[in-house]
Image (spheres, rainbow, N blue to C red):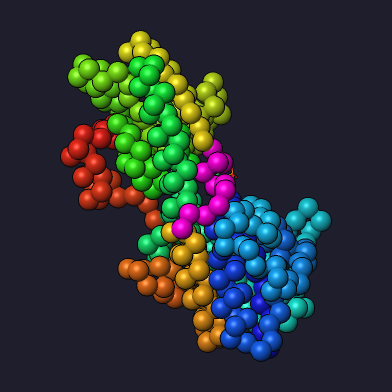
Amino acid sequence: MKRIGLLTSGGDCQALNAAMRGVVKGLSRNLDELEVYGFLNGYKGLIYGDYRLLSSGDFSGLLTKGGTILGSSRQPFKKMRIPDEKGLDKVEAMKQTYHKLNLSCIVILGGNGTQKTANLLREEGLNVIHLPKTIDNDIYGTDVTFGFQSAINIATDAIDCIHTTAASHNRVFIVEVMGHKVGWLTLYAGIAGGADIILLPEIPYDVDKVIRAINKRTKAGKGFTILAVAEGAISQKDAKLSKKEYKEKVAKRKYPSVSYELAAQIMEATGVEVRVTVPGHTQRGGSPCPYDRILCTRLGSAAAKAILDEDYGYMIAMVNGKTKRIPLEQVAGKLKTVDPDCQMIQEAKRIGISFGV
Ligand code: F6P
């Protein structure tokens, strides 16, 4: 008999349900007795004892269903040790819920912050398995996270659509892609969508070089230019500011995001029309792509195997095409960023894509 808990935490993505399905199918086919408790709205459910006993029927039809049947919320790691407004010790509360239900383990699906709390619970003696979810693909220790490929498809579709209208109107278009801290999604969607300029948080841009790249295309007879700009893209000038100074600048800025600020700078310098498109949360929505369905089925099944082996305290990662158990203490708190000198960037530069440097 095993009693397992499931929770999905942080920003949602397309393949959370598919991953939970993989875990539960992998367990139910190999155990005579299984109880699955789904905690609602991320760590909140574990803290406040808000859960549902789920049946196998709850997991059918989930392979293609976006979002999360459990709901999600952001519970910042740095606030986990701070009591809630009623003075409740959140970590103790989570432990109590876990022990009250006599769980064998809890499977936690989420990104970096979620992983740090999962590691904290491991340190507190709970049996934990983490599955790496995020469209940002920034989890250290796994080659890929689920949600990433589905989001690439959506962001690429957005750039494809912009291409035709940009060409008709001879305009400069900025497509703002999700990712505040890392630029994986922008890099992949930018290349897949044939963007002319790609701006990433990891490579602070020189606005004059961006403008020069646009002018060069105009001189070569190209009527339009497409920029794929990460939410967290930053100019070289702003990158020199301290974190505090930059936050203050952003708070005072009259533009809703870096893309609009850049658009104004380009318009002023070149006189061409610039438009900004923000696909936003569409990038996290809809059905998981086939790649993510397969990835989640494999990661979920591998998580089930770790639970059957009673081997806990791991992130189930994908490394060189194989699922792998990575100790949480080795990866929690580390971010996987784009290396500005990596082969992919060099190859992109070689075919003429500008990174604004
Ligand atoms: O972490 C996933 C992500 O979609 C980021 O790419 C994005 O910057 C952020 O979440 C948006 O967060 P929220 O959904 O809380 O607005």
Q: Residue furthest top?
A: 271
Q: Position of residue 45 (x, y in %)?
A: 73, 62
Q: Which residues are magenta?
A: 280-290
Q: Residue at x 39, y 23 (%)?
A: 166
Is residue 73 or residue 82 the one in the foreground? 73
Which quadrant: the N terminus?
bottom right
Q: Is residue 43 left or right of residue 222?
A: right
Q: Position of residue 177 (x, y in %)?
A: 45, 38
Q: Kindly indicate the quadrant of the structure image that contains residue 266.
A: top left
Q: Is residue 119 visible?
A: no
Q: Kindly indicate the quadrant of the structure image that contains residue 187.
A: top left
Is residue 83 or residue 326 the one in the foreground? 326
Q: Residue at x 32, y 13 (%)?
A: 270
Q: Is residue 77 left or right of residue 201?
A: right
Q: Residue at x 32, y 24 (%)?
A: 225
Q: Residue at x 31, y 32 (%)?
A: 197
Q: Is residue 83 left or right of residue 131?
A: right
Tag count: 0
Quarter for ligand 1? Answer: top right
Which quadrant: the C terminus?
top left
Q: Position of residue 304 (x, y in %)?
A: 55, 78
Give above or below for 263 relative to 182. Answer: above
Q: Position of residue 329 (x, y in %)?
A: 47, 71
Is residue 238 or residue 38 the one in the foreground? 38
Q: Is residue 282 magenta?
A: yes
Q: Is residue 355 visible?
A: yes
Q: Residue furthest left?
A: 350
Give above or below for 140 relative to 313. Answer: above
